[in-house]
Amino acid sequence: IQMASLEDLKNVLRETLEQKGSLNKIKAEIRSEIFTALDADSTKGKPPLPQENVLINELIREYLEYNKYYSSASVLVTESGQPQDPPFDRNFMERKLQITTAPGQ
């Protein structure tokens, strides 16, 4: 019986995480933490986001997440100062922008 090399195990793990869609999410979380650590000092004294910017950022985040651009969404939240949890739901955005979406979306 031959044991798998460390490189073989790394490759299998990488492939498994890629197939599950977890690898990009993990990379995005690491990037977010790095941005947070690097940006910690520069956010002191940063003015709060105007409500219009929060709404625009939330629309962009919804677009990014809908298209599974989780890395980009994570960076947007970190760099913009947008709350981690959406500050309002989709119905609020639809009313505010006076739009409607098709059922099931």
Image (cartoon, rainbow, N blue to C red):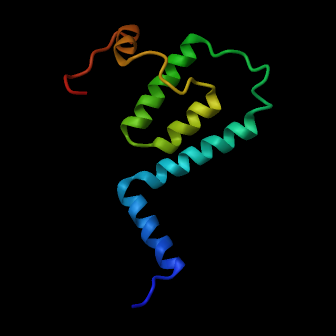
| Residue at screen point 35% across, 8% down | 95
Q: Is residue 46 left or right of residue 91?
A: right
On the rendered image, what quadrant is the C terminus found in? top left
Give coordinates of residue 64: x percent, y percent. 44, 36
Q: Please give the name of the residue rendered at 80% of the width and 31% of the height, measured from the top-left corner.
A: 41
* Residue 98 sits above or below residue 102 on the image: above
Q: Of 17 and 46, which appears nearest the observer?
A: 17
Residue 85 horizontal/vertical position (percent)? 50, 24
Q: Residue furthest front?
A: 1
Q: Is residue 16 above or below residue 9?
A: above
The quarter of the picture where the N terminus appears is bottom left
Residue 74 place in picture, x, y as percent: 54, 38
Q: Pick whichever, 93 or 13, lies toward us.
A: 13
Q: Position of residue 99 (x, y in %)?
A: 32, 14
58 left or right of 31 in image: left
In terms of image quadrants, where is residue 32?
top right
How many labels were placed on the picture? 0
Q: Report the residue at 68% width, 37% height from top.
A: 36
Q: Residue furthest bottom?
A: 1
Q: Quick check: 11 left or right of 44?
A: left
